[in-house]
Amino acid sequence: MKRPDLEFSELGLHHETAIAEYVAEFVSAGESRIHDYFGKADWGHAKTVKKLAAWSQGEDLAGWAPSSTRFLINNGRIIGNYNLRHELTESLKRCGGNCGYSVRPSERRKGYGTMLLANAKDLGRTLGLDRILITCRVDNIGSSRVIERNGGVLEDVVHDEESNENLSRYWITL
């Protein structure tokens, strides 16, 4: 579903106010983390933009997999984001997968998660990936539905010792 009022974009310097409002909404909703947005509060906006751009080029990884982060934007307002890892480490093969995404609390249940993952699949094809692994908590029915709408096939359920949660592991063929 294409909508002219929506765009996918890398984070730019001009998004400083939009990302601050995006992060603030998660905090206000009592959510302690935004899945797959790796900006750090102490970095400042310019450093976050620089880091995300470097990681997409496989630079400055510090043990992380190369990854590309995109934001779904509606008239300057960030609706959601995803991070697509270009390869899988052993840890990501088990619990993290290739892709994670978030939709701001006030915009959930409107189809944006499905759009984010569909765009991530397009980017994965562009990067030459044949398939991507997506994981979500077993009790996250909304995320499971988004993954399944995008062709996700459940492989198994694993226990993540770090978070002490059970995770569903889905593969999506690109």
Image (cartoon, helix red, strand yellow):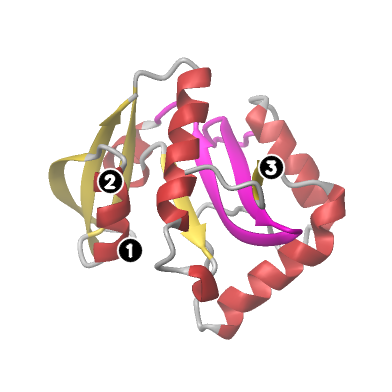
The residue sitting at 50% across, 37% down in the picture is 119
Does the magenta portion include 67?
yes
The structure residue drawn at horizontal position 78% and vertical position 57%, both measured from the top left corner, is 43
Please say if 140 is above or below 88. Answer: below
Going by the numbered disc 3, the residue's amino acid type is: Ser
How much space separates mark 3 and mark 2, taking CA atoms? Answer: 23 Å
Eye-nearest disc, 1 or 3: 3
In 3D space, how far apart are the residues under numbered discs 1 and 3 (Cα atoms)?
30 Å
Residue type of the residue flagged with mark 1: Ser
Question: Is the stretch drawn in magenta largely helix, strand or loop?
Answer: strand
Label 1 SS = loop
Q: Is residue 44 visible?
A: no
- Horizontal relation, residue 146 to residue 77: left or right: left
Question: Which mark is on residue 163?
Answer: 1
Q: Is residue 120 above or below residue 38?
A: above
Indicate left or right for 95 with 169 as reference.
Answer: right
Whole-percent x, y for residue 139 in the image: 22, 67
The segment highlighted magenta reads 61-88
Residue 55 rendering spot, x and y as whole percentages:
65, 34
Inspect the image, locate mark 2, and give the three-letter code of the amino acid beneath it: Arg
Q: Which residue is mark 2?
A: 149
Of the pair 105 and 37, the residue shown nearer to us: 105
User: Helix, strand or loop at disc 2?
Assistant: helix
Label 1: how many Cα within 10 Å (few below 14, some 14–19, many 20+)? few
Residue 118: quadrant of the picture: top left
Residue in view at x 61 percent, y 43 percent: 70
Badge 3 element? strand
Q: Quadrant of the C terminus?
A: top left
Mark drawn on residue 6: none
The numbered mark at residue 9 is 3
User: Does residue 55 show up?
Assistant: yes
Q: Which of the two labelled residues, at mark 1 and mark 3, occupies the earlier sequence position? A: 3
